[in-house]
Amino acid sequence: MANIKDIAKMAGVSVTTVSRVLNNHPYVSEEKRKAVKHAMEACNYQPNLNAVHLSKGETFLIGVVIPFTNHPYFGLLVEGIANEAVKNNYKLILFQTNYEEEREIEALKMLQYKQIDALIICSRKCTWNTIEEYAAYGPIVLCEDSRGKNVSSIYIDHYQTFSKALAYLHNKGHQKIGYCVGRRSGANSKLRGKAYKDFLRERKEPFNHEYVFYDCLKFEDGVQVVQELMKMSSPPTALLVTSDMVAAGMITYCKEIGVKVPEELAIMGFDNQPIAKIMHITTMELPLVEMGRKLFLQAIDNKESSHEEIKVKLIERKTV
Amino acid sequence: MANIKDIAKMAGVSVTTVSRVLNNHPYVSEEKRKAVKHAMEACNYQPNLNAVHLSKGETFLIGVVIPFTNHPYFGLLVEGIANEAVKNNYKLILFQTNYEEEREIEALKMLQYKQIDALIICSRKCTWNTIEEYAAYGPIVLCEDSRGKNVSSIYIDHYQTFSKALAYLHNKGHQKIGYCVGRRSGANSKLRGKAYKDFLRERKEPFNHEYVFYDCLKFEDGVQVVQELMKMSSPPTALLVTSDMVAAGMITYCKEIGVKVPEELAIMGFDNQPIAKIMHITTMELPLVEMGRKLFLQAIDNKESSHEEIKVKLIERKTV
């Protein structure tokens, strides 16, 4: 049976070119593509692409680590990554980790074992040590500030963004400000927590742990936060909510129980998801699709590790 | 350098067992796993898993074809697929097709070239002929009725479901009923269109093309449908909306412009997404996570093609 080397020889091209034709890679001349297809037909060649990848070390697969597939924040990131992958003829291997470290390590091992060309980590549980252990095996790109580390990053300065949002609420006259985040211990959540504590310290205001809400990921989580606020003797008058979808849940429930937004509760979202525009949610715009696009391009760029900060924009609407 | 056969020999196990250990597959005894790990360490073996897959023909990768990554319907399906994949130590290759046939064929080719063990097609553009051409290369599972074809399916009877929903609206007194779907020409959309026309024919009512809305996928699309209704001299009094997210957009916008739901416009959603519960949307419950789970299990099941219908439940709330 003919193998990829035979095909290359017959077509008068390199093995790399055959591999690219098999992978529908764009950078092959029409002439060479025809020669390869012709040789394949002549031999009735049915490639096992694992063999092709073995000979070339390229898989045209990029791994993407996300905690949840069904979440609007990661949805938009993956949309950006996937759009750019399609354009460049790469496919994505999706690792839904549920924030289990073991799953993240499986993804890192696929990089080590050359089953993927690069790995994009949208959010992680594992430590820096773990990531740096695998960085030698191939490009790793993170969606958080990783300057000074041996990996690339496309990131938002969450400390500064949170500080800016807090200052905005304060300037609007709010003294009792709380916030909602997705995780207690994530890298981004820690930076936000630090910004919040520094903000209080500057104003010599006490930290009230009741004003901080964790595990806020979905529309329905917003409902629950408002239900908790209703039980407090001195609830916050404004909330920073790091997901528009959670903010939308809050606003919907506030309307239902007759709590006026923003008069009784000011709500500031994050992301600028489509729902934020329609529900007139004041929000911090994170260009997630664009970030996804850049994450992908960084992953297939073979240059040294690089870092790019993405700027966040305040969008004033009607909920603050 | 040691290869996988050497490791198998040293450890006194089969090549299959080594492959399973490398892939963290569950069905390996602790004893054999230790022997393999020991042999690997002794040789300082760094496997290229493409070689492993080449020798075994198993990749522990399942392809998933979806038109969009960032959509709540596909989000829930992929969540179900991904949850079950994690449990069974498989990874997913995601094909975001944007309904381009070429992308679907790329996925089918990966099955042909043994780069994936099976392919799940959540929604498709290509014809049956194309799919059947590739069915010989490995298991293909579809999310639509494919009885009589050489592939497996986990499906909903969309004709019957739509007929049931139309009858429900009619029994509530509605004469002018319209509907919104995602695509004009999808397999499911065609069945729904047929159910709609048959419903009208039985009642000797005329077909009004103004009452049918296509390309309704997102929250913001619901807003646009209501804006179009406002321009009509004789708008429908009830709408079947094949996505709760679109229905939520409609309800939010109706509130904003003072259109009473259900008095002036009855809205029936589909899916029973979390947002449907919170916004009290009457809806047809599609158990999407469970369907995703079954799609995955069918994909790794090596038995002959099989077909399972998933039942849909009407959930009565406050929008009809």
Image (cartoon, coloured by chain):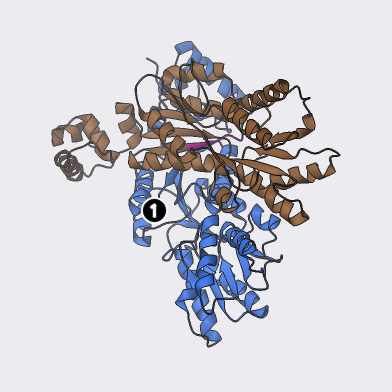
Chain colours: A brown, B blue
Residue ID at (70%, 23%): A197
**Magenta span:** A94-98
**Does residue A72 appear anywhere in the picture?**
yes
x and y, in percent, of residue B215 in the image: 46, 61
Question: Toward the viewer: B23 or B249?
Answer: B249
Would you place residue B267 above or below residue B86 in this image? below
Question: Toward the viewer: B279 or A101?
Answer: B279
Q: Is residue B299 left or right of residue A262?
A: left
x and y, in percent, of residue B114 in the image: 38, 40
The kind of residue on which mark 1 rests is Ala
10 Å crowding of disc 1: few (<14), some (14-19), many (20+): many
> Where, quadrant-wise, is the N terminus of chain B in this rendering?
top left
Residue ID at (79%, 29%): A208
Would you place residue A191 above or below residue B168 in this image? above
x and y, in percent, of residue A55 in the image: 30, 27
Check disc 1 and report the residue beneath it: B135
Residue ID at (34%, 50%): B105
Q: Is residue A308 left or right of residue B133?
A: right
